[in-house]
Image (cartoon, rainbow, N blue to C red):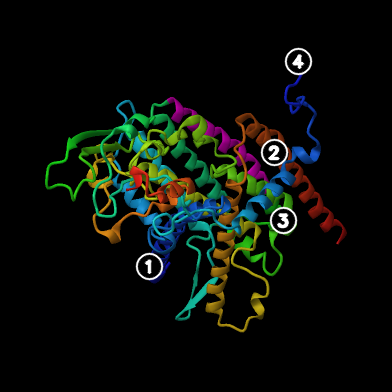
Amino acid sequence: MESWEIIYKIVFLFIILGITLLVAMYSTYAERKVAAFLQDRKGPNRAGPFGLLQPLADGVKMFMKEEIIPLTANRTLFILGPAIAMTTALLTGVVIPWGGDLIINGHKVSLQVADLDIGILYIFAMVSIGVYGIMLGGWASNNKYALLGSVRAASQMISYELAMGMSIIALVLVNGTLSLSEIVDQQQGWHWNIFYQPLGFLIFLICAFAETNRAPFDLPECETELIGGYHTEYSSMKLGFYLFAEYINMFISAAVIATLYFGGYHFPFINRLPLDPNILTLLGSLIFFLKIFALIFLFMWVRWTLPRFRYDQLMNLGWKGFIPISIFNILITGAVIYGKELFF
Amino acid sequence: MQSLSNRSKIVSHKKMSFMERIYLPAILKGLSITIQHLFRKKTTINYPEETREFSEIYRGMHVLKRDDEGRERCTACGLCAVACPAEAITMVAAERKPGEEHLYREEKYAATYEINMLRCIFCGDCEEACPKEAIFLTDRIVRAGYEREPFVYTKNELVEPMDPDKRIDVSKRQTSAVLEFKKNKNLPHNK
């Protein structure tokens, strides 16, 4: 790798980091606005025009709050918890293809930080580590509610990761690759995976809700039963990190869903536009972000519509519902692909 | 047992059908309901900029009226304090000295007059009890505050300004029967 390439990658990494944080920040604003609109309210509209400075005000509030570490807590793990949650949430953005290739001064540069051959597996690995952040935080707080919340989070994530992984296996059968950029490239035009894998998409989407701990699967932090769940004992910016990590996770999940099932940065009729390739690439990235925002809106829409699942219903749905369905999905996909090879 | 309201239902333990068990139709129905609310008119009132429409006879903060010549009408008879169900009103009476005739309408007046706005329930019984048409409830709002002390309103807050232009209009609170009564100038009350 040449030196300019390394510099480019570092700069691009920071851009991605910035965009991720910005989107997550305004997701909190959007969440409150969407919640308000769905309930016939107006939402935050005091800080700045349309309340656009609300996230900043929230951030300042979080920083100003008193930092409390309980006496009985395990200090190291207590601080490590939110750090892990935040770090792993940010790490997943690395493998997502944010756009096609740009040509700058005759050099071809990719709008993807790392095109791993096993991009999907990498995302799964990071998400799995993210559970540790919640588990450690809940355990180290030395609080019954926090412990219950983290136990719930751990079991919920493990249960739903299985079904999620199996819905991905069917996807891999269709696309024949684990690399995210290649999966995107196979979805040009209208060849979006959602049309080939509708059942798999549904499973993946619902599991993504569960993985991000969002309603209707927000049992780890269900405030009616567990006060705050795993972050009951947290205050100040450590709490802010946990809440923020959730929004980053939501953004990343939306990006992954858009990449895997909605053609990523491709959109139909892209080749017919008489435009410069660089502009087309940037337009593709813009489209990708629009897809992501639409999915984030879906996340919020669902949250403010559905009530929370009961814990046994959640486990029933995961183990008795989604796992058999996803296995069935793999079988059907495999049979169709085999049949195609046999007869065509 | 016989049902009193005829609205009780017998709990059914019927198994959910397949469509009910996969939840999705119900979820889509719910989503369509919430999305409709996105386009509805918002019910929020932006308070300091907009205010809710008040009734003409709204019972808000009290006013101690002056008469047309600017003299305080209150004679510290104490009937309002007796009528007050929340015991929010207290006063100290004093005798009018010579030379104070332009300040107080009759020989006796209230040296201090306090209403505890935290106790007041804004029922309007004080105004009903007052024989001198001295106290009225108005459509002004008692402001919120951080401490308890300022909520005990004294004559400074309650008595209306001397300036005729700044007088507080309470004509809306006077019923037609009262207005009719006031026309009879032969009664001592109206002199």
The local secondary structure at tag 4 comes to loop
Tell me, yes or no, if residue A252 can be seen here.
no
Q: Nearer the viewer, residue B60 or A242?
A: B60
Q: Is residue A162 magenta?
A: yes
Q: Chain of mark 2?
A: A
Disc 1/disc 3 C-alpha distance (Å) = 36 Å
Q: Is disc 4 in contact with disc 2, using a CB cutoff of under 8 Å?
A: no
Task: Estimate the spatial distance between the alpha carbons at disc 4 and disc 3, rounded to whole Å.
Answer: 63 Å
Residue A169 locus on image (x, y percent): 67, 48
Q: Earlier in the sequence, mark 1 or mark 3?
A: 1
User: Mark 3 highlights which residue?
Assistant: A174
Asked which quadrant contains residue A3, the reply is: bottom left
Q: Is residue A87 magenta?
A: no
What kind of element bears circle 1? helix
Residue A7's disc is 1
Left or right: residue B23 versus residue B54 is: right
Which chain is mark 1 on?
A: A
Q: Nearer the viewer, mark 2 or mark 1?
A: 2
Which span is picked out in magenta? A144-167
Q: Please give left or right for residue A54 compared with residue A258 in the image.
A: left
- Residue B56 in view: yes
User: What residue is at 57 percent from the left and 42 percent from the top?
Assistant: A215
Q: Where residue B147 sits: x, y (%)?
A: 26, 39
